[in-house]
Image (tube, rainbow, N blue to C red):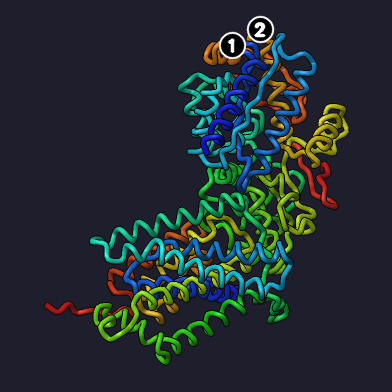
Amino acid sequence: MSFLSYLINGLSLGSVYAIIALGYTMVYGIAKMLNFAHGDVIMVGGYAALTMMLATGTNPLIAVVVAIVVCTVLGVVIERIAYRPLREAASPLAVLITAIGVSYFLQNIVLLIFGSSPKNFQSVVLLPDLKLAGGALIITGEAIVTIISCIVIMIVLTAFINKTKAGQAMLAVSEDKGAARLMGINVDRTIALTFAIGSGLAALAGVLLCSAYPSLSPYTGSMPGIKAFVAAVFGGIGSIPGAMVGGILLGIIEILGKAYISSQLADAIVFAVLIVVLLVKPTGLFGKKIQEKV
Amino acid sequence: MKKLIRFASIACASAMLFSTTAFAEGETFKIGSIGPMTGAAATYGNAVMNAIQLAVDEVNEAGGVNGAMLEFNPQDDENDAEKSVNAYNTLKDWGMQMLLGTVTSAPCIAVSAEAANDNMFLLTPSGSAVECIAAGDNAFRVCFSDPDQGTASAKYIGENKLAEKVAVIYDSSDVYSAGIYATFQAEAANQPFEIVAAEAFTADSKTDFSVQLQKAKDAGADLVYMPIYYNEASLILTQADAMGFAPKWFGVDGMDGILTVEGFDTALAEGLMLLTPFSADAQDDLTKNFVTKYEELYGEEPIQFAADAYDGVYIIKAALEKAGATPDMDASALCDALKAAMTEITVDGLTGAGMTWDETREPSKEPKAVVIQDGVYVGM
């Protein structure tokens, strides 16, 4: 029974990682850059929702929508101001360093506005806990909503990419930017759209994360951000199903590792798994092997 | 813009003038303190700073020390070692002669190394890690050290037969928490209870405690010992409630402050026990006077950290009087005088009667346990 309980916790945590990892992986797949500020967009989403709920006492669902809008705009603005001018820079490191800068910038702005005291986050999930087997197995409403959101997002996103014009444009840009441009695709707009979707998902992930573990500080996004990045690499960076599977596996490994091996070593286990996977399959679980044509 | 700058500089200059006229160099004892006044541990820092200010005002109203007034300068470190050392340097520039700090363990260890180099007198009100005062013979402590807390907790649980199966949840990345756990575990071997689960978390993963709680529950623990700070403890209590796990809870001084956590349902803390040398409901005159004044000034009941800090001021006062120190002495000379005086004084404070210090520079006093009932601390 406790194994089931661990498994559900792992699934729920993994689903959050998966939603965050989608943002990493889409941006990498299309813009070929690692957006290390992604984790902090999560945190901004949390604060946006919290502020809405506290300041206006609005319905949590409206707060979630506001958080998504705020983060979507933020993602597009960051891309426009910080990343786009560097896209053609000689070294890909320039934009990577900028991303780290943006990450610290966001943390410190929030630190300045809200202070460093952790805020207690009121859950946005109105679903009651599910008690099974006479109360021996409790599945929280947050876990149910997180897992369902994760599945829905994956289905919608896959359909979006395969069935819509904008999605096809994304695929084309990820294959070959130059060729896509020649075919009449607006590359800048496609990349901006990617950031918008990724950041909107980050806001959702932030709200779900804070609902499940109700503590929000300016540093809340950094560790889940890193873990989600690991999940994206684990699943094969650039691959959407890879990010989903990677995220969920990572969450389950983390929780089961904590439960059955050692709670002291939980994080070490997660990163050790990453190393092993990369040694055996350097492109990640779902990564495509790209043959360089000479 | 130019006007603004000119105005600002005039304001600065007049402020400087004002401060120098108010307290000329060498006429006051300059006491600095460093602690988290913002951030996750802000409750401690603010309690300490409030209480020091209160005590300093009291001492000054009563005529000061050796005919000189005390002057107090609080600095924020957000419970971060690096920021704490920066704050220490700021205070040195200000002309600090004694440091009544720092408040939390990890920053205190960093600062105490600096203070030992400078031969600056350091009295930490609440830094409980052993290493806080280990860097040099210039550092003393008001509160119990971690080993004392761990040992005392184990003895208390054992002697009062509070539980047979104990689970521990601690922060393995924090010197305070890990230190207490180590001595708790050592003493537990001599006590009539068994540690059935010892689960750790780290600073990077301090929001999800479902696994640790599930393991404690599966191990059949009837008491969970939490040598951790109150913020994480509030999450643990909330998550335990959600999973229907209701053992006895036992904490140490870091738990003090749990009733003030924003948005935390304090009903969940009912019955929580904690080891602390101070309880605000004690009926002696010293405590009553302190609690009344503190509530009047700051609108809340003082926690143990406030009591430690209040005692700290009176300990410094006693030591300064014993040493016959004068404010024109430099920090190092003052430190040498105070070091000798500390082992000779006996102070009756809020956190213990007849506190004394020997060459270990640790205080000797008795711990007390309190339990939370109807939202307040009640002595056990």
Question: Judging from the image, what secondary structure is the residue with disc 2 in?
Answer: loop
Reading the image, the residue beneath label 2 is B324
Q: Residue furthest left?
A: A294
Quarter of the image with the C terminus of chain A in it: bottom left
- The Cα atoms of the two marked residues, 2 and 1, are separated by 8 Å
Question: Judging from the image, what secondary structure is the residue with disc 1 in?
Answer: helix
Q: Amino acid at mark 2?
A: Gly
Whether B62 is drawn above or below A150: the answer is above
Reading the image, the residue beneath label 1 is B337
Residue A10 location, x and y as percent? 53, 72
| Lateral position of residue A55 relative to residue B285, left or right | left
- Foreground of the two, B287 or A122: A122
Q: In the rendered structure, the residue with mark 1 lies on which chain?
A: B
Whether pointer 2 and pointer 1 mark residues with C-beta atoms closer than 8 Å, the reply is yes
Which residue is rendered at x = 54% and y = 59% of the image?
A: A220
Quarter of the image with the N terminus of chain A in it: bottom right
Question: Is disc 1 surrounded by few (<14), some (14 to 19) or many (20+) residues within 10 Å?
Answer: some
**Location of residue B16 by image quarter:** top right
Residue B45 location, x and y as percent? 65, 38
- Foreground of the two, B149 or A153: A153
Question: Is disc 2 surrounded by few (<14), some (14 to 19) or many (20+) residues within 10 Å?
Answer: some
**Location of residue B222 by image quarter:** bottom right
**Location of residue B218 by image quarter:** bottom right
Residue B207 location, x and y as percent? 59, 60
Residue A163 location, x and y as percent? 42, 92
